[in-house]
Image (cartoon, rainbow, N blue to C red):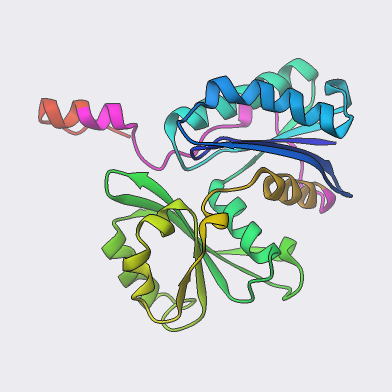
Amino acid sequence: MLLGIETATELVGVAVGDAGGVRATSTVTGRRRHVESLAPAINHVLSQAGVAIGELNAVCVDVGPGLFTGLRVGVATAKGLAQGLGIGAIGVTSLETLAHGALDGGWPGSVLAVVDARRSEVFVAAFGRLDPVDASSMVELEAPCRFAPAELARFIEAAPWGGGADVLCVGDGARRYAADLAAVKGVVVAGPTMAAPQPASLVTLAAARLAAGSPTLGAADIHPLYLREADAVANFAERSGSRASP
């Protein structure tokens, strides 16, 4: 039995499920109320699923990249639950979760997950699948990296999985920079329903990995994936005339 925690973007989401599927899910969007929203959402979803917290076998959490505050809240909560309950933890990136949702929804081509990194940048990774009908066979075509939107368009055109092939761009970054991306041949920008990683996709992906034999991790081994220094650090470096180390 898995509890999934999703806080990488402005969406705060929780889901409960197992190898048989997702039993209950809850999402709250907007105003970055991660701290206030997460604990009540966990209680609500467990109640709706009829699952006692002591019945959980593992907790899976979106480790980013995404909003720094949201990631800290989600990862810290997952660590606390894993340690307190004596269960394992699973870290899944926001980019994997976004892509899995698109592939599970039936998209036949490549998927480019694009998360808004603020400061006129995006976090991205590209995915495909080995089995045309099995989203759990998802494979990473391009490792997580960071781009300016204009650079990303050129990158897609030059990539072996892009360059005129069908590529679906998902995530809030894809929505924000839709004009830049849609100008690339073969690229389709997904609608708002695929703007944020969903907790149901997080649980489904984590459950598939466990079923395939992937081990859980200890609470101490789960870490956020930031891909750059926090905005506060960057702003301080700009004001002081030096660049801080990531």
Q: Is residue 221 magenta?
A: yes
Can you tell which quarter of the image residue 69 is in?
A: top left
Residue 181 placement (x, y as % from top left)? 37, 68
Left or right position of 97 against 3:
left
> Start and end of the magenta stretch?
211-235
Residue 169 placement (x, y as % from top left)? 48, 65
Quadrant the C terminus occupies: top left
Left or right position of 195 against 79:
left
Q: Nearer the viewer, residue 221 or 78?
A: 78
Q: Residue at x 30, y 32 (%)?
A: 231
Whether residue 136 appears in this view of the structure is: yes
Q: Residue at x 82, y 41 (%)?
A: 17
Q: Give the residue furthest to the top.
A: 84
Q: Is residue 216 magenta?
A: yes
Left or right position of 217 against 2:
left
**Numbered label tally:** 0
Whether residue 142 appears in this view of the structure is: no
Quadrant the N terminus occupies: top right
Residue 139 placement (x, y as % from top left)? 63, 64
Q: Give the residue furthest to the bottom.
A: 164
Residue 66 placement (x, y as % from top left)? 46, 41
Dominant secondary-structure state across the stretch colored magenta: loop
Q: Examine the rendered structure and indicate whether residue 208 appears above or below residue 80.
A: below
Q: Residue at x 77, y 31 (%)?
A: 45
Q: Examine the rendered structure and indicate whether residue 33 appears above or below residue 120.
A: above
Q: Residue at x 89, y 30 (%)?
A: 50
